[in-house]
Image (cartoon, grey):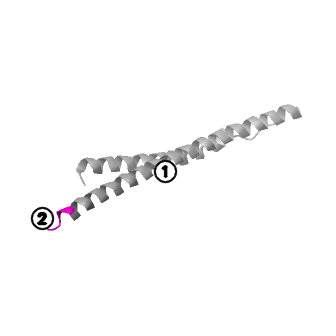
Amino acid sequence: MSADFKAVLSDLTSMATTFHDQATDYRKLQPQVSPPVVSGGDAGLDDAIKEVAHLILGLHIGFADRLDDHGDKVAYARDSFHRHDVDVHGVFEDLMVGDG
């Protein structure tokens, strides 16, 4: 495996780890994003505030999930690159048997 290829694999590993770490950190912000909902004095207003709060929380969780998904995809790409490189080296080694 060439040094350049190892650098790419380590960069992809770092990127996947960063996506997952940032998703975890973003999820930890949930209490700041969704504070307790207070009463506005009107039932209709209270319902509207609750719905907006649920929407904001859903968007927050959805974004964290997307970060995790991107981390998974980068890790899959890294693993695919590694498998492909091993396969290519194996083919060349098989072709060279008996030539040495």
Relative side of 42 to 76, left or right: right
Q: Is residue 71 above or below residue 94?
A: above
At x 34%, y 50%, the residue is: 9
**Which label number is shown at residue 40?**
none
Q: Nearer the viewer, residue 51 or 84?
A: 84
Amino acid marked by disc 2: Asp
How many callouts does the rendering have?
A: 2
Q: Where is residue 56? Give x, y as percent.
A: 68, 37
Residue 43, quarter of picture: top right
Q: Is residue 47 above or below residue 97?
A: above
Amino acid marked by disc 1: Asp
Residue 63, quarter of picture: top right
Would you say residue 69 sits in the magenta stretch?
no
Q: Where is residue 15? Give x, y as percent.
A: 41, 45
Q: Which residues are magenta?
A: 95-100
**Which label number is shown at residue 72?**
1
Question: In the rendered image, which residue does mark 2 sit on?
Answer: 99
Image quarter in which the N terminus is found: bottom left
Q: Secondary structure at mark 2?
A: loop
